Image (cartoon, rainbow, N blue to C red):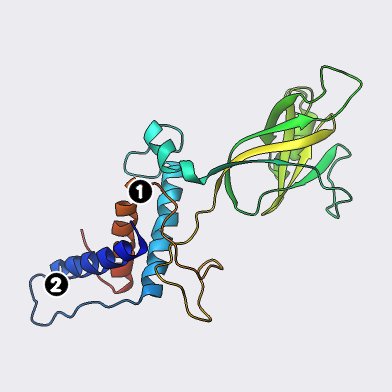
Amino acid sequence: MTTQEFSNSFDTLLNSYARKASYGDSSSYQDINLDEYEKSLFLTEAQEQLVLTYYNGKNSTLDSFEKTEELRRYLSNLVHTAEVSPEENSEESLLTSNSQIFSLPDDLWFITYEAAKLGSSSDNCVNEKLIQVVPVTQDDLHRVLENPFKSFGFRRVLRLDITDNKVELISKYSISKYIVRYISKVNPIILVDLPNGLSIDGRIKARTSDLHEALHKAILELAVRLALQSKGIQIQ
């Protein structure tokens, strides 16, 4: 849908549902009027909720991302891959002498695949070898390091989350690149250029949804339901 189609359909659907919720008492019913900024907020919230449910499987079919071809196509526009080099002279405190710090892409939301490319070594079997990266929690780190079957080594690298955009990788060998494929945070839906002082996720320019067009109707339906709930109107 274009931004204009989103806006017009939102108004039509919103008041259609609201009239049904009034149980036929049309004499006292008044149309609900939302401005373009308010509609943009509801559409953006609905879009984010929809992406989350398709990623984690908490949807009507209980299917999660990559479980079906359909869901892969729905979120394909949000899948990106980055190769990140280690930070030099990082100010982060390292938990082990085998740690390196990597900054994640700013738009990263959920990691779907990760690997470490090993750096140069006197062992030719190690040079540029891709090995598995395994996330661990800080609470579990000591226990994992003490377990020879779960610790880092020739076949695995451990990953600790530090902040929203940094990770600490623990490896027996030097890492030249951290390869991460991820679902990016979805851009907001903004129906018109926003006036001074208003923005959504830091954006002010009009834009439609980045998601597959097959999801636009679902975004619209959910956005309208959220708008009705904000007015105290519940629909079946």
Compared with 188, 36 (above or below) is below
Q: Is residue 236 above or below residue 35?
A: above
Where is mark 2, residue-wise? 22
Q: Amino acid at mark 2?
A: Ser
Residue at figure coordinates x 54%, y 53% from the top left: 185
Name the secondary structure under disc 1.
helix
Instruction: Answer left or right for 159 relative to 7.
Output: right
**10 Å neighbourhood of mark 1: few (<14), some, or many (≥20)?**
few
Residue 193 lies, in percent from the top left, at 45, 73
From what the image shows, is residue 88 above or below residue 142? below
**Residue type indicated by callout 1:** Glu
Give whichever of discs 1 and 2 has the lower sequence position.
2
Q: Is residue 206 visible?
A: yes
Label of residue 4 in the image: none
Residue 65 image position (x, y, % from top left): 45, 38
Mark 1 or 2: the one toward you: 1
Quarter containing the C terminus: bottom left
Drawn side of residue 231 relative to residue 198, left or right: left
Q: Residue at x 37, y 74 (%)?
A: 36
Depth check: give the residue in front, 49 or 9: 9
Q: Image quadrant of residue 4?
A: bottom left
Q: Which residue is mark 1?
A: 213
Residue 150 placement, left or right of 47: right
Residue located 86% across and 55% down the image: 91
Percent across and percent down for residue 174 are: 85, 33
Rendering coords of residue 18 (x, y %): 19, 70
Label 2 CA crowd tier, 10 Å (few <14, some 14–19, many 20+): few
Quadrant of image for the N terminus? bottom left
Q: Is residue 222 above or below residue 59?
A: below
